[in-house]
Amino acid sequence: MRGRICQPIGYRKPGGGAGACADVLRHGRRKSVSVCVFWRRCERLGDRLARAALLHNRSEKSPRAFVCFWVILGDLGDHPNRQEKKKGPNQADPKGANVASNEASTSAAGSGPESAALFSKLRSFSIGSGPNSPQRVVSNLRGFLTHRLSNITPSDTGWKDSILSIPKKWLSTAESVDEFGFPDTLPKVPVPALDGTMADYIRALEPITTPAQLERTKELIRQFSAPQGIGARLHQYLLDKREAEDNWAYYYWLNEMYMDIRIPLPINSNPGMVFPPRRFKTVHDVAHFAARLLDGILSHREMLDSGELPLERAASREKNQPLCMAQYYRLLGSCRRPGVKQDSQFLPSRERLNDEDRHVVVICRNQMYCVVLQASDRGKLSESEIASQILYVLSDAPCLPAKPVPVGLLTAEPRSTWARDREMLQQDERNQRNLELIETAQVVLCLDEPLAGNFNARGFTGATPTVHRAGDRDETNMAHEMIHGGGSEYNSGNRWFDKTMQLIICTDGTWGLCYEHSCSEGIAVVQLLEKIYKKIEEHPDEDNGLPQHHLPPPERLEWHVGPQLQVRFAQASKSVDKCIDDLDFYVYRYQSYGKTFIKSCQVSPDVYIQLALQLAHYKLYGRLVATYESASTRRFLHGRVDCIRAASTEALEWAKAMCQGEGANVPLESDREDEEESRKVKFSIYSKDHLRELFRCAVARQTEVMVKNILGNGIDIPLLGLREASIEVTGEMHELFKDESYNISQCFLLSTSQVACSTDSFMGYGPVTPRGYGCSYNPHPEQIVFCVSAFYSCEDTSASRYAKSLQDSLDIMRDLLQN
């Protein structure tokens, strides 16, 4: 027999295999089986045809039935359109392939003509790729099954329900599916139901607004959502937009989050990432390490060009669902451009031209150089050749007769200010070319000088010591260098903050990156650099000797600056230094436990840490505030993130109980330095069982919000869409979005994100509002790394005090849940 019967899914006879299948076919039904579905990918492609035999239970008396798909391979040779002749029960195929028995045509009522039509349709497809793939055949079978289920009589509901319990992906009506049964094309971002969005919005407002504010908002929502209100019209506008565009929300979100924001990029938008420091003995070590990083960047670029970037899939919640990879292609060769009113992006083409060079821009002591890594006339540079180019920069920049103008410092200014400065720069053709070289560079490499020790952490008594050190510099000091460069006297002019990826290497071994956030989320950046870093760590002795000097030196970029711009450098220095001096930043490692213990409590580490952040804030201020946690929406086409709002009513009730009803500024355990004070007996007005129950309710709510967001049913993207739709449809913003409660909900006084790293690295950023906190976290098996930020200009916030409150919160949560 040319083809073979596939193993059943969900049914295996003892001693199984094809015998089990034959037994089912012979007896017509088995009591232990409601449904048997036979399917496995065809092993031989090309001129093969999938033929399906649909068998129904022939017993009219039985209320149960089953469906069996029997997939057999048959060779059509060179005649894909030949007519199929009717065959008897025992008649063999002319080519020698077995054909399903004509029991299918004489089975239960209603199966004959429909099955024949199905078989005829299946025979019109050849096995291959694209629309004629085996997955297309399966899709048609699913569609047929779905149609048949709609006609089942009430007495058959038992087996009908068993089929309907199959995951939605198996009943998909998509034309083709992947190996895991998901559609080959990513779905579009949904537009959630209006009533559901408004109900979830009210629920999100409850813990962060007053009763009077909430009541006014409810009245506005009633008017907005009324049958004759504007809400239904705006919702339909978004539905129509969804049909017409790949991602209806993308540009609304991009402009709201990035392009329309006018404040400076460093601290406020660009995150900084610190990797374990290196040990450089000579300047040659610096050059070789930089060369290995750039060689890894170029290898990744080649992988993108060849289309070999592996597809990522969801690890949970519809496991193995494919994720959108678009942002991975925007990391290299991209750049943000300032605008007076709105910024824009320079994005590279997905297809490389044959004569296109690959280059990077290297900045050392504010002087910029163009280093070509791959040229059309000489191919790709080796690591040693790249190292020779870096070594030239390291030796040339300190010896320049005149101190170069810090053009990069202008990129740290407010966006509208920098846009006007850039327009003045572009009046000179040579400056235009320099800007083009920077924008099209794969990355910018910054070769830095070490920061002074005054950027070290301002911790608290009992805090764990820093793990990474470079000389007398601690982890907080290193993070400052990656986020902003240290100021005009250090490395802030040695940057181009518009560039998507800036690799930063300091002569004392500190290294990491600063990245512009609008093109990509952190996960793409982290994965790229960790892949390169691990390769370097696995092959530490790959040194090709002394750098080769046979190449022409890299081009130095000369800027031509008029008197008007010369004045701007002094102003920019003062402005940037003031912002940096205001940043209160602290890298805190909590080392009492990590995600191993958290998982033993049967709680998601992310949910657990988010509740710890809420409790830490409540202990300091006696209230919860609007909290932002990024939730990936990459399950959808061009999906980026939505907002998980961790401040819930359930979290508030739990935090109140954990603090025993006390108000703001609860004394922290780490504040109690007097031993006698710490020995005092403390009474609890709530039992541990009650506190655990409140905690479980808070966990359930946080998990529910998280799942809704990653599946495209959050509230922030839909609300943003309705707001923008009201402007586009009516010409003005609806009153609902001018409401005080809406403004409160959009002022994220606690901005958080999990930045998970497989190495001992961490990423941090500044707060998104002058009165707020920023807090990233990286959970490890036995510790959690936090990067906490605030502003000194706000008297009510303190990064070290919030970290102290976090320590207390995590300690008492362990005491509550252990054993």
Image: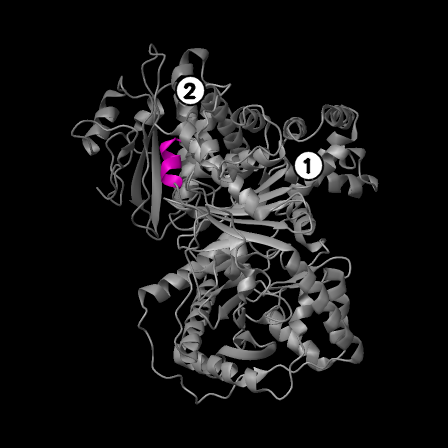
Q: Farthest residue toward the right?
A: 731
User: In terms of secondary structure, what is the magenta stretch mainly?
Assistant: helix
Q: Quadrant of residue 469?
A: bottom left
* Image spot of residue 176 (x, y percent): 46, 43
Number of the front mark, 1 or 2: 1
517 in magenta: no
The residue at the point 39 percent across, 50 percent down is 128
Relative to 147, does residue 137 appear above or below in the rendering? below
Q: Amino acid at mark 2?
A: Asp
Sequence-earlier tag: 1 or 2: 2
Q: Farthest residue toward the left?
A: 15
The residue at the point 47 percent across, 82 percent down is 391
Relative to 751, does residue 423 appear above or below in the rendering? below
From the viewer's side, name the closer residue of 536 and 173. Answer: 536
Query: In the drawing, does residue 664 fall left or right of residue 690?
Result: right
Q: Which residues are magenta?
A: 594-602
Residue indicated by mark 1:
745
Say few, some or many: other residues with alpha carbon within 10 Å of mark 2 (under 14 / 14 to 19 / 20 or more): few
Residue indicated by mark 2:
161
